[in-house]
Structures are given as structure tokens and as C-alpha cells.
Image (cartoon, helix red, strand yellow):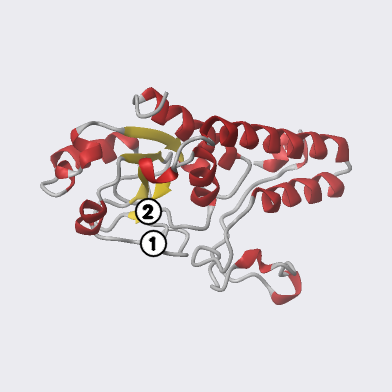
Amino acid sequence: MVHLALGLQDRMVGTATWTDRIRPNLAPSHGENRDDESGDGPRTKPLRLSTIQTEVRQLAQIFDVRAKGEALAADLQRRLEQVRADNAARDPKEISIASWFANTESPYVAGCCGSSGIISRAAGVRNVFADTQDEFPQVSWETMLDRDPTVLVLGDLQRKSQTGDKLADKIRFLETDPVTKRLTAVRKKRYVILNGADMNPSIRTVDGAEKVSAGIRRLGLVR
């Protein structure tokens, strides 16, 4: 993603998903504030935009496009600050959200400290699963109903890996399952849609913040 934003697509030959522990001699010194081996579990500290900006600057330096890197990092900062400013006057407790990534049986939802943390803080909302440091903890639908968020943030994943990856499948499930159809957000159809990439740490985290901010306004929850 950052490579494309820096205009480096002609220097890429492919992409891959990190599924194993990184080799010790290649591990970054900051370890991304994680204490798991997969790169998908708990964070010891919340993700900050500065971490994403550091990645941008490092890649820009490697490929000798420093000016583009600085411009991109600055633009991300400007956009996120605008979202914060748009929502600064509201108490985050007024609107609660839960962000559903995938899986209908035991849903993966966003925890406190990944992209969802940046998004929630900027958009002035409360993540009902902010009490877990896991990136995407699995919960039960009964727990979701117990916490009953004002809004459901739904990931529209362009893959076919788990149940509920696609937006249409998510909504169909939510509105027909005997437990989920009792959720306030489902009864009132309060959905905000994100791309799957918006929900993972990347430059698209800022896209996610903008979409959540705009979405709660579109739903008439704030002026």
C-alpha cells in the first residue's frame, strides 16, 4: 500500500501475508509494540499514526523518494487532525461502536489498540471492545448483544476465506440470526462500511477514520 502511494509500483514484484514469526536478524528494534509471535495478537501499547508515518518515511528513504514520503506523511497527519477537529466537541461516550472484521460463528472484532484505536479516538466514539489488547479478538454474539453498540462498523472484505467476509453476507446474517437481529444497531440499520484494508494498520487507517466520522453523521447521530 505505501509502495503504491509513493509511486513505486514499477519496483514491486509481488506482495505476501506475514504468517510466521520474523527472523530474529530482521526483527525491527521497536517490535511494533507486540508481544505475540504471529503479528496478529495483543499490542502492549496502542498503535499511533506516527508508526505508520515511520514506515512511509523508511520506504521513501530506501527508494530515494524522500520528498514524496514527507508529503504523504504530512497529508495523513493533516487528514487525521481534521477528523479529530470535526469531532472534538463530543463526548466519546455518546456513541459506541463495534467493528466486525469477519466470521459469523465467532466474530473477529476490533480490539483497543490497532487501527480501530486510531479511528475511534479521531472519530470521537467508544469501541465497546476496547477492554482487550488483541488486534481482532473473537467474541460471542451474546457478548455483542450484551454490549449493544450504537453503530456497527462492517468490513467489506474482498476475499473468500471465512464466513461473513463480504458485506452482503454480514448484513444478511445480522438481520436474520435470532441473536444479532436484536442488536440496536441492526434494528435501526446503523451500519458504517469500511474496506478490510481500512481496518488494518496502514495508510488506509486514516481512510477508516474519515469514513466512520462521515458515517455517524450520515446516520443522523451527530450534526
Q: Quadrant of the C terminus?
A: top left
- Farthest bottom residue in view: 24
The numbered mark at residue 109 is 2
The three-letter amino acid code for the residue at tag 2 is: Val
Q: Residue at x 82, y 39 (%)?
A: 70
Relative horizontal placement of residue 195, taking residue 29 as reference (left or right)? left
Q: x%, y% of residue 139?
A: 30, 61
Image height of 136 relative to 164, above or below:
below
Image height of 112 relative to 121, above or below:
below
Q: Residue at x 45, y 64 (%)?
A: 134
Q: Disc 1, disc 2: CB below 8 Å?
A: yes
For marks 1 and 2 on the same chain, the one whose residue lies earlier in the sequence? 2
Residue annotated with mark 1: 137
User: Which one is nearer the viewer's eye here, 48 or 124?
Assistant: 124
Image height of 94 relative to 219, above or below:
below
Q: Quadrant of the N terminus?
A: top right
- Per the image, label 2 sits on a secondary structure element best described as strand
Counting the numbered discs, the total is: 2
User: Which one is nearer the viewer's eye here, 84 or 186?
Assistant: 84
Q: x%, y% of residue 80?
A: 62, 37
Image height of 184 relative to 138, above or below:
above
The numbered mark at residue 73 is none
Q: Residue at x 57, y 42 (%)?
A: 205
User: Which one is nearer the viewer's eye here, 217 or 91?
Assistant: 91
Q: Residue at x 52, y 58 (%)?
A: 113
